[in-house]
Image: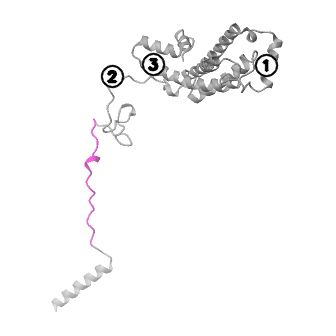
Amino acid sequence: MTSTRLCAAAVLAALSTACAGQSTPAPPVHSAPARADTAPLRADQAAPPAGGGARARRGGAPAPRAGAPAPRAGAPAPRAGAPAPESAEPSWVPPIVHSLAVFTVTRSVEAVLWPDPFADFRLERWGYHYGEAYTKPPLFDASQPAFRWDHDPWPINVVGHALLGSEIYMRARTCRFGPAAAAVFAIAGTHLWEYGYEANGVRPSALDLVYTPLAGALLGELRHATWRAAGGIESAPARVFVRALVDPFGELERGIGVFDC
């Protein structure tokens, strides 16, 4: 009887515990150990800057990339604010002033060599020739031999006008004009010569209006290429000689300090 009572008492105790909602307490949760890289800093250590240590340099300068070549010792630093030569803007004043001076001198030489009609300064004669120039098409006489369609000798048309056009073109190129811009400048200068300087003595020539800028661009570009190539000559006297040979008036202007291009 005694054992039966003991078993019944044990069953009742278990049932009463379950009904009361008691459960075995959970074991305490232990926090994960701190990582080595999150340990507190010592007094002589500085906290890394935000964004990582890639820019941890004095003044915020970025760290050199791995494998990047080191700067050459003794290399000169670029000048602050110095524009690259290829980005320089064209200079308009030197080629304009140069072309006007060449036209004036050439027109004066014409008046000396051919007084009739170029030395006739009567206003009525100038008015007549200018009126003819602006009311009639450019002169082109197909009955004349080649390169004499304007009644001028062929050496003047072939050689003289090619040199005149190349002088205008060359001056624009040395003052940082591109080939296309220099060609347009030569075309404008040719029209100014035919309809401005020379039209008070003779009618504009269709041959000169086409041939002068065309031959001038071809010859002028060859002169300009030679002038640039001469910059690589180590001997200073030889370099000056070659450049003066292909651009005598430009070298004179730069030599005396009138222009810098």
Mark 2–mark 3 contact, CB under 8 Å? no
Tell me the element at label 1: helix
Q: Mark 1 is on which residue type? A: Tyr
Q: Is residue 76 visible?
A: yes
Asked whether 141 falls inside the magenta stretch, the response is no
Mark 2–mark 1 contact, CB under 8 Å? no
Q: Is residue 176 visible?
A: no
Give the percent coordinates (x, y) of residue 181. Answer: 60, 28
Give the percent coordinates (x, y) of residue 112. Answer: 69, 7
Which mark's residue is nearer the viewer, 2 or 1?
1
Which label's residue is closer to the chain start, 2 or 3?
Answer: 2
Q: Which mark is residue 74?
A: 2
Q: Mark 3 is on which residue type? A: Ala
115 to the left or right of 222: right
Location of residue 212 (image quadrant): top right
Asked whether 39 falls inside the magenta stretch, the response is yes
Quadrant position of the C terminus in the picture: top right
Task: Measure the alpha-carbon separation of dots 2 and 3.
Answer: 29 Å
The residue that disc 3 covers is: 230
- Residue at (48, 21) in percent of width and height: 226
The range drawn in magenta is 24-44
Tell me the element at label 3: helix
Tell me the element at label 2: loop
7 to the left or right of 224: left
- Out of 6 and 46, give the one closest to the viewer: 46
Give the percent coordinates (x, y) of residue 42. Answer: 27, 39
Which label's residue is closer to the chain start, 3 or 1?
Answer: 1
Q: Mark 2 is on which residue type? A: Gly
Give the percent coordinates (x, y) of residue 1. Answer: 16, 92
Q: Which mark is residue 130?
A: 1
Majority SS type along the magenta span: loop
Task: Measure the alpha-carbon separation of dots 3 and 1.
Answer: 44 Å
